[in-house]
Amino acid sequence: AQSVTQPDIHITVSEGASLELRCNYSYGATPYLFWYVQSPGQGLQLLLKYFSGDTLVQGIKGFEAEFKRSQSSFNLRKPSVHWSDAAEYFCAVAPSGGSYIPTFGRGTSLIVHP
Amino acid sequence: DVKVTQSSRYLVKRTGEKVFLECVQDMDHENMFWYRQDPGLGLRLIYFSYDVKMKEKGDIPEGYSVSREKKERFSLILESASTNQTSMYLCASRLGASGNTIYFGEGSWLTVV
């Protein structure tokens, strides 16, 4: 079975600063990888996903993520954070076969200071 | 756009009550999910449905059951609500298996008193 770890429970950045949210996974093969964002009181929205090919993936709202097989990581980045990016971010990993049911990390809460 | 609608956003129920959480999706998706979200624990899968009348237990099915009589509707049932089931419940749907995007509803906040 797969597992995913988001080591940071909270991250605080200043508006305009760069951002990196960490995600590490455990799975025997190359998994399907996802980042979702959840604004307060809302459901989750997909930011980006990786299945295969180019290891640098572009998503919505100016986010990108890089798949590093050697480090079993799929970190999310943004060069300049806006106050509206304050939210909860979830990394998810799904097996590349079977039911493809994803496992979600515990989330990282992003706080943006003006 | 895909729309996943959870009809009840906020519910307060008493211990021992039977609770129904309803979810409807409008994109003819085969797969539907019910997750529970608690602070610090992320999302945990309660039940998954491959298609109509087909279901599979997730990681935390105890105390819950589900019903999928029509493709667009997936109901979560708490047979006898308990205070430890106070949580945010998220419904989601997906077009078939593979790595397709999972679309989430806005969630149902359930408080059991």
Image (spheres, coloured by chain):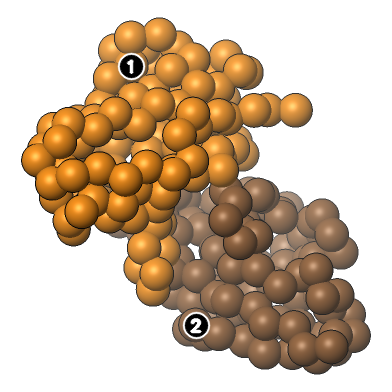
Q: Residue A30 carries which label?
A: none
Residue closer to the observer: A40 or A8: A40
The three-letter amino acid code for the residue at tag 2 is Ile
- The answer, for residue B95, to whether it is visible in the render is yes
Q: Mark 1 lies on which chain?
A: B
State whether discs 1 and 2 lie on one chain: no
Question: Which residue is drawn at the image coordinates 77% and 89% (left, top)?
Answer: A113
> Is residue A40 placed above or below A43 in the rendered structure?
below
> Is residue A18 placed above or below A25 in the rendered structure?
below
Q: Colour of chain A?
A: brown
**In the rendered image, what is the letter of the chain coloured orange?**
B
Q: In this view, does A97 lie to the left or right of B57?
A: right
Question: Which residue is drawn at the image coordinates 66% and 50% (left, top)?
Answer: A46
User: Residue A66: image x %, image y %?
Assistant: 71, 70
Which structural element holds mark 1? strand
Q: Are marks 1 and 2 in contact (CB under 8 Å)?
A: no
Query: How far apart are the two marked residues, 1 and 2, measured between alpha carbons?
Result: 35 Å
Question: Which residue is drawn at the image coordinates 79% and 56% (left, top)?
Answer: A59
Residue at numbered disc 2? A9
Residue at numbered disc 1? B68
Question: Which residue is drawn at the image coordinates 55% and 75% (left, top)?
Answer: A108
Q: Which chain carries label 2?
A: A
Name the quarter where the C terminus of chain B is drawn. bottom left
Question: Crowdedness of circle 2 by 10 Å Cα count: few (<14), some, many (20+)?
Answer: few
